[in-house]
Image (cartoon, rainbow, N blue to C red):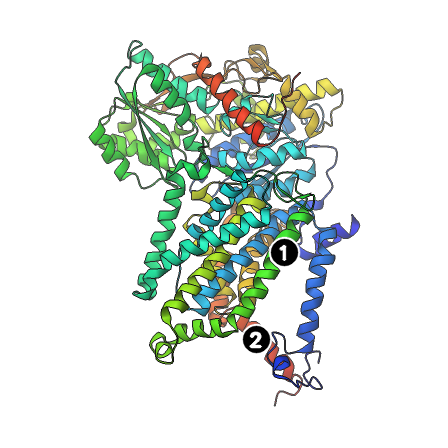
Amino acid sequence: MNIKRMMMATAVAVSVATPALAELVIPSLVYRTGAYGPNGIPYADGYADYFALLNERDGGIGGEMVNLIECETAYNTEKGVECFEATKDLGSLVYQPLSTGITYQLIPKATAADIPILSMGYGRTSAANGKVFSHIFNFPGNYWSAASAVINHILDQENGDIKGKKIALVYHNSAYGREPIRTLEELAKKHEFELSLLPVDHPGQEQKSQWLQIRREKPDYITMWGWGVMNQVAIQEAANIRYPMEKFIGVWWSGSENDVIPAGMKADGYKALAMHNTGMDYPLYDDLKTYLYDTGKASGEHAGTVLYSRGMYAGMLAAEGIKTAQKMTGKSNITAGDLRDGFEVLEITEEKMAAIGMPNFGPSFKVSCESHGGPMVTAIQQWDAKNKTWSLITPFNPGDMDVINRLIAEDSAAYAAENNLSERCG
Amino acid sequence: MLYREAGDFKVSYQADQQTFPIRFDRLFFWALLASAYFVVPFFINDYWANAVLLPFLIYGVASIGLNILTGYCGQVSLGSGGFMAVGAYTCYKMMTAFPDLNLAFCILAGGVTTAIVGIMFGLPSLRIKGFYLAVVTLAAQFFLVWMFNKVPWFYNYSATGMISSPERTMFGYAITGPNATPAATYLFCLTFLVVLAFLGRNLTRGSVGRKWMAIRDMDIAAEIIGVNPLMAKITAFGVSSFYVGVAGAMIFSVYLGAVEVTEAFGIQKSFLLLFMIIIGGLGSILGSLVGAAFMVLMPVLLKNIMVNSFGWAIDIAAHFEFIIIGGLIVFFLIVEPHGLAQLWRIIKEKMRLWPFPH
C-alpha cells in the first residue's frame, strides 16, 4: 500500500490519496465547460450551494461535514469514467452524473463498487425496477413517465382524442434522446397518432433540415428531448417558422431559462415538463442568502432558475437519503452501502419539504426495494416571456402506468438476462 | 557515457539491422518490457488502469495503425473514428452472437472487418491524393457513424442505441465487465500492443514497408522502379485499418464497457489520432507511442496538478488545460516539426558523441 501511495505521489503527482477524515464525501460530476456548460453550471451551483448551506448552517448532516469534490466531465463519458475512478476510493457516497451516457457507463461499475447512483430524471429508465438494479435510483421521474406525460397533456388539450394527429419528436441523437422513443411508439399504437422522429446530432446547432421537415409535415404537436445549445436553437427555429409555442412541449431538460431567453418574446407560451417547482418563493432562499450569497461564499447568480432549483433538489434528495441512512444505522459516518439502504426506504413527505424550507417544491413519495423510480408524476410548466418566469400550469399527474410498468419490466428483464442477474426483494 | 557504441561490434548484417543497434537501448527496452509485465501489474489500481494506462495502450495501437497509413504510406486519413466504430461494433456483434467465443478472437475479428472496410474506403486513393483523399476519408467517418446510429441491427435493437459489453473472461480472469481487475485488463491490452507494435515495426522495415515509403516519397518514381501502387496503397489501408479496428474493439469492450457511437467514435477521435502521430512523429513506431502517451497523459497530469495540488476551480483548470496543451503542441512543432520521435533521435545522436562532439 505504501509503495502504491509513493508511486501515485511521485509519478503523476496525484494527490487524490489524501485520506478522508470523518466526513461525508460526495463527488459531484459536473460540466462547467463545453457545449453543455451553460446548462451544467446552474445545476452544479445548485447542488454545491445546497451542501455548502448544510455545512455553514447545520455543521453538515447529522454532525458530519460534507466534503463535496467536483470533477469536470464536460458531458464526456471517458472523462466521466476517469472522474468515477479518481473519486470512488475516497469514500464517495453517491454519484449524480447529470448525463445519461455517463450513467450507463457507471451502472455496472458503481454496482460492483457498492456505491449508489441517483440519476434523477435521466439515465436508464428501467433502473426504476429495484429488483434488477440494486444500486440505481431514478426517482422522482423518468423519461418514459415524461413521454407519457407529454401525450397525456396533448390528450387533455384535444379532449381525449388524438387519433390521426401528427406528433413529432425532436431529439438529441444519443442514448438520452432515444430513451422516450419506445414509449412514444407504444402510445402511438394505443392512441393511434402518427409519430415522426427527427434526430439532431451533437451538439445540436445544426437543425435546419429537421425544421424544414417540420414545415413540410406540419405536425399538430412537437415534443423535444434536447440538451445544451440544442434547446435554444430548436426554440428559435420553431419561432422562426411561427410554430404555435403552446403546442411545443419539451422534456424537463429542455425547459430552463437558458433555453427560452434567446428567442425573446417569440418563445412566449413554450411548455416543458417539470419534476419539481421553481422560483425564489421558498424560505430556504432566506438561509441561502444569509449564509452564502451575502457572505460571498457563493455567487447565487443562478439562484431561482430552473436548473439551479434542480441541482438544489438533487442535493436535497441526497441529503435526505443520508439522514435516513444515519437514522437507520445509528451512526453519523455512514458508508456508501448504508446510503444505498437509506435510499431504498427514503420517504419524502410534505412536512419534510416544509421543514427544509421547500414547501410544495416537489411531489411527496416513498421509495421501496421493488420500486426505485419514485412516484413518476410530472407537471407541465409554461414560459411567460414578458415576466421571464416559468410557472406550473398543471398539478403533478401520473403517466400511463400500465404502459410504463410493462416497458420497465421488459427492459429490466433483458438487462438481467444479459448480465445473469437474479431478482432481489424476496 | 552510457550511450556508447565503442566495443559493440556488429559482425553480421542481422546484428547491424536490428531495431535497437545500441546495447544500452536494447537493455533498456527489455528492462522496460519486463517491468511492464512483471512489476506494474502488482501495483496497478483502478485509477491508474482506467484513467492512464488502458487509454495509453489502446490509443498506442490505434496511432501505430494510423501512422502506418499516414506516416509510412503518405495517405492522409480522417476516418479513423469511423474505422474504430467498425471494430467496436463487430466485436459487439461477435460477443453477443457467440457468447463462448474468446474475447481475443472477437477483437481480432473486429480488426479484420475493419481492414475490409478500410480497403473499400481506401480504393479512391488510387485516383485522388492529399486533401481530396482526406475529404473522402472524412466521408467514411460520417457515413460509418451515421450507419451505426441508423441500423438497429448493429446495436441489437436496444432502446437507446448504446452497446454494452457483457462479461468475458480469459484464463479465468474477467477482462470485460465491472468485475474485471485492473491488472487483467492491463495485461490484456499490453499484450495486444506489444504484439502489434512488434508486427508493425517489422512490417515497416521489410519490403512491404519500403514499398509504402516509396509511394509516400514519390508515387510516380515508385511506380517506375516497379512498386505496384494498387497493392502498396491497399495493403497500407488494410493493415492500418486492422490496427485501428482492434483499438476500437478494445476501447469498447475493455476500456469503456458501454459505447455510444456518436460520442465515442466521432470526428474528434479522428483528430485526436492525427494529433498523436503528428506530435509523436510521422513514420515512426516509437513516435506513435510517444504521441499517444502525450495526448493521454498530459490532460490527466495537468488536471491532477491544477485541481488536486493547486486546488484551482475545475472549470478554470479545464480551460487552462486547453491552453497549455495547445501551447505545448505549437511549441513542440516549432522546435521539432518532425515530432517527439525526431527529438529523441537527435538527443540520442548527441549522447553517443558526448562528451567529445567533434
Nearer to us in this view, B23 or A121: B23
**Along the horizontal axis of the image, is A118 left or right of A198?**
right
Chain for disc number 2: B
Nearer to us in this view, A213 or B154: B154
Q: Which residue is mark 2?
A: B345
Q: Which residue is mark 1?
A: B190
Q: Is residue B317 visible?
A: no
**Which type of secondary structure does the marked residue at label 2 adopt?**
helix
Front tag of 1 and 2: 1
Image quarter (top left, top right, bottom left or bottom right) of the N terminus of chain B: bottom right
Furthest residue in direction right, as rendered:
A2
Furthest residue in direction top, as rendered:
A159
Residue in the picture at 55% in, 68% down: B201
**Which type of secondary structure does the marked residue at label 1 adopt?**
helix
B226 above or below A291? below
Q: Position of residue B63 (x, y in %)?
A: 51, 60
Which quadrant holds residue A12? bottom right
